[in-house]
Image (cartoon, grey):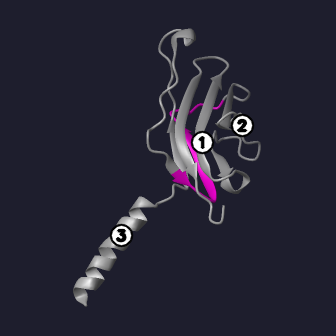
Amino acid sequence: MIKKLIITMIWLSAFLCANTFAQDLTLELNFPSENIAKATAPRPLTKPIAVSGNATIDITPYPDTIEKDRYLVEYFLDDQLFFQTSGFDESNPDKLSFRCLLDTAKFENGRYKLIVNFWDKSGASAIGIQEIEIRNEGG
């Protein structure tokens, strides 16, 4: 009986680890060091990150200085723009944030390339790519 319980616990742990869903995701941006024409986007990871529900997406690195109307960050699933921000929040002018909330219920289950374009009007622009898999229940 104890042996069965241990085997069940091991199987359940393996199942839960294999099916964990990311609800917080941070994309690392690739800032080109040479001419932008020579820059290539980073390759997405071979294994997609599973997401469901409302997933918070953020980027790194980004500037810690606040300069209104200097930055623009665009979030795409494949070629569909679903969010953009300047990073500036009128309700909290001392804080710069490029986070967004991805409501996966608005998209069909399946694999997507999550693409983030970071535009700096006074400096280097960057891109981040991560393959994700939307897995909503009943979808």
Where residue 134 sits: x, y (%)?
60, 52
Label 3 to label 1: alpha-carbon separation? 27 Å
SS at mark 2 in the image: strand
Report the amino acid beneath label 2: Gln
Label 2 to label 1: alpha-carbon separation? 10 Å
Could you say which is closer to the camera, residue 91 or residue 16?
A: 16
Asked where in the image residue 70 lies, by quadrant, the reply is: top right
**CB within 8 Å, label 2 to label 1:** no
Which residue bears the numbered disc 2?
80
Location of the C terminus by quadrant is: bottom right
SS at mark 3 in the image: helix
Q: Is residue 60 magenta?
A: yes
> What number is the disc on residue 64?
none
Which residue bears the numbered disc 1?
112
Q: Earlier in the sequence, mark 3 or mark 1?
A: 3
Location of the N terminus by quadrant is: bottom left
The magenta segment is 50-66
Report the amino acid beneath label 1: Tyr
Q: Residues within 10 Å of mark 1 (few under 14, many from 20)?
A: some
Where residue 127 sits: x, y (%)?
56, 27
Label 2 to label 3: alpha-carbon separation? 36 Å
Q: Residues within 10 Å of mark 3 (few under 14, many from 20)?
A: few
Report the amino acid beneath label 3: Ser
Instruction: Establish if 99 lies above or below 119.
Output: below
Where residue 111 sits: x, y (%)?
58, 45
SS at mark 1 in the image: strand
Where residue 17 sits: x, y (%)?
39, 62
Q: Identify the residue at the far right of this view.
A: 90
Asked where in the image residue 89 lies, by quadrant, the reply is: top right
Which residue bears the numbered disc 3?
13
- What residue is shown at x 35% (from left), y 66% (from top)? 14
- What residue is shown at x 66% (from left), y 32% (from top)? 73
